[in-house]
Image (cartoon, rainbow, N blue to C red):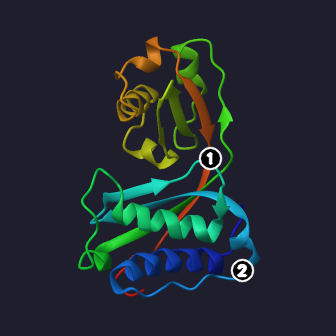
Amino acid sequence: MKLTAAEKKTLLTLARQTIGGHFTGAESPTPDAPALMRPAATFVTLKKNGELRGCIGNLTATETLAESVRHNALAAACNDSRFAPLSAAELPAVSIEISLLSEAQPLDYADANELRRRLRPGIDGVILSSGRRGATFLPQVWEQLPTAELFLSHLCRKAGLPADFWRTGQPEIAVYQVAHFAEEAGAAANP
C-alpha cells in the first residue's frame, strides 16, 4: 500500500494523539482519507532514546489502517508485556514508527540450510510457528540480528522454543515485507 507523505504524517499524528488521549481522556479524530479506511495489518513501534520501548501489531488486516494504527499505538504504549506501561511524562521522549505489512506468504523449505538461504535479510519479516507457539520479527530486526542464524535463534526463543529449533524442528515459516516510516527527529517533542 503506497501512502502519501501527508497520509503518513496523519497516521503518525493519530498514533501520538491516541497515546496522549489515554492520559488526558481526549479522543483522537478519525481521519477521513480513503487510503486510511482500507483494511491493513500494522505494527507500531515506540522508541525512547533509540531503544525499544514497546512494539505491538497484527499480522492480518482485520481493521482499517487508521483503526489498526490507533489500536496498536495504544497497545504498544500500555500492553507490551516486556515493558511497564508508558507514563505521560515519557511520551514527549518517545518516537513512533509505523510498519504496514504485506500479506504473509508461506515459505517452503527442505532443511535448515535452505531456510537460511531463502531468507532475505533486511527485506523479509518472518513468522515462525510450531503448534501453539509462534513469534514474528519485523524486517527492521535484521539491523540488530544481521545473520539468519542469529535472527532465527532469537525468533525461536521469542516463541518460547529452544534457540536451535529452526535447525531441528522444521517450524512453519511465513514471510512478509513492510513499508515503514517514523516521526522526524524532534517531532516527538513538538507534535
Position of the C terminus, as image quadrant, is bottom left
Location of residue 94 in the rendering, given as x and y in whole percent from the top left corner: 33, 71
Location of residue 62 in the rendering, given as x and y in whole percent from the top left corner: 65, 56
Q: Which residue is mark 1?
A: 177
Q: What crowding class fits label 2: few (fewer than 14 Cα within 10 Å), some (14-19), or many (20 or more)?
A: few
Q: Which mark is residue 33?
A: 2
Kindly identify the amino acid type of the residue bearing the numbered disc 2: Ala
SS assignment at label 2: loop
SS assignment at label 1: loop
Q: Give the vertical position of 40 relative to 32 (above or below).
A: above
Position of the N terminus, as image quadrant, is bottom right
If you read the primary sequence from the N terminus, does the residue marked by circle 2 or circle 1 appear first? 2
Kindly identify the amino acid type of the residue bearing the numbered disc 1: Gln
Can residue 56 be seen in this snapshot?
yes
Q: Which mark is residue 166?
A: none
Q: Give the vertical position of 111 relative to 138 (above or below).
A: above
**Residue name at image x 57 percent, y 58 percent:** 42
Q: What crowding class fits label 1: few (fewer than 14 Cα within 10 Å), some (14-19), or many (20 or more)?
A: some
Instruction: Single out the residue that lies furthest toward the right.
Output: 34
Location of residue 64 in the rendering, given as x and y in whole percent from the top left corner: 67, 66
**Residue name at image x 41 percent, y 25 percent:** 149
How far apart are labels 2 and 1 at the CA level?
24 Å
185 relative to 127 in the view: left or right: left
Q: Give the vertical position of 54 relative to 157 (above or below).
A: below
Nearest to the observer: residue 143 or residue 7:
7
